[in-house]
Image (cartoon, rainbow, N blue to C red):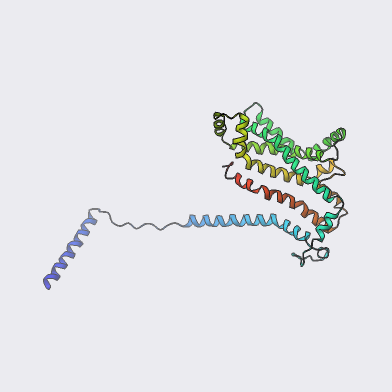
Amino acid sequence: MSADRAAQADAQGRAQEARSAMNRTGAPSRRVLPPIDRAPLRRRRRRAVWVQLACTAVSVFMALPIVLIGLAAVSSREALNEFPKPLVPREFSTETLAAFFRATGTVAALGNSVLVGLYTVFWSLVIGAPAGYALARHAFRGKDTYQVFILFVRALPIVVLSVPLATLFLRVDVYDTVLAVTLVHTTLALPTTVLITASIFVAVPPDLEEAARVFGCTRWQAARRVVVPLALPGLAASSIFTFVLSWNEILGATIVTLGHRTLPAQVLTALDEASTAYRFAGGFALIIPALAFIFVMRRYLVNMWGTTLR
């Protein structure tokens, strides 16, 4: 028994001596990893939280007036005349909106605004998209000067454009028509349409168009079958901007029309004598069509970030 214990102690001693020898000869030993620095991850998380809070604050700031106007538009006349007014009406009523649409000229003005907006989108794309395509695909002398000149037209006050156009419309007998307002709004929308479509067509690779021409397409067929489908989200974004611009424009429509006004011009001219209910209902009616148009075109606008503008 004592012999076994002696042998075991001797084996343990030899193992200890071997480990000591390995340490003296520089053999590898287990290394302790340094602690992980989690400060960058915490800073990134805090930055993401602050960005989300900022986006939420901006969204609330933009949506709050729309919500308040909408709540006032669906309130009764008695609720609008109360002081202090409740934030949320106790009961909802369509009386305010019904009275607004029963007012003289409101429905006709709404139809004029829709027609002018759609016509402006159509003519802006028909004229502006080819111009933007030419700017994106061709290099010519005076290209930069031409783009600056386009922006200069947009920088002019609306009165500078509307008064000469109104004089011209009177001479050619198109004053006080939907066509007159369409021409004014198209003039205002063309500069931004040209520049937006030019930036969209630049983002479409020219190699795809050249490949289509190698397979037998003409320049027109390559543009129609290859370029336009890829640029469609950007064209939709341009049409949204154009429609909202046309819908919200007031001064030009007021100058070139008298009896066939658009809805913003109609509401503006009636504000002095209008009641509080008419004003809230008019503001709500001006917001809804533009929001509906953006809602219909939103998928093209969202797709633009993942397709054309990569």
Tell me what residue is drawn at x 66 percent, y 40 percent.
235
The image quarter containing residue 47 is bottom right
Which quadrant, please, contains the C terminus?
A: top right
Count the marks: 0
| 265 shown above or below 225 | below
| Residue nearest the viewer, comparing 155 with 32 | 155
Residue that extends furthest to the bottom in the rendered view of this protein: 1
Residue that extends furthest to the left in the rendered view of this protein: 3
Image-based side of 198 in relation to 164, left or right: left
Tell me what residue is drawn at x 66 percent, y 39 percent.
196
Say whether residue 159 is visible. Answer: no
| 197 shown above or below 266 | above
Q: Position of residue 287 (x, y in %)?
A: 75, 52
Residue that extends furthest to the top in the rendered view of this protein: 141
Which quadrant, please, contains the N terminus?
A: bottom left
Q: Position of residue 214 (x, y in %)?
A: 54, 29
Q: Position of residue 215 (x, y in %)?
A: 54, 30
| 283 shown above or below 93 | above
| Residue nearest the viewer, comparing 16 with 2 | 2
Image-based side of 110 in relation to 131, left or right: right
The image quarter containing residue 176 is top right
Tell me what residue is drawn at x 71 percent, y 51 percent.
292
| Residue nearest the viewer, comparing 180 with 102 | 102
Say whether residue 57 is visible. Answer: yes
Tell me what residue is drawn at x 69 percent, y 45 percent.
240
| 8 shown above or below 53 | below
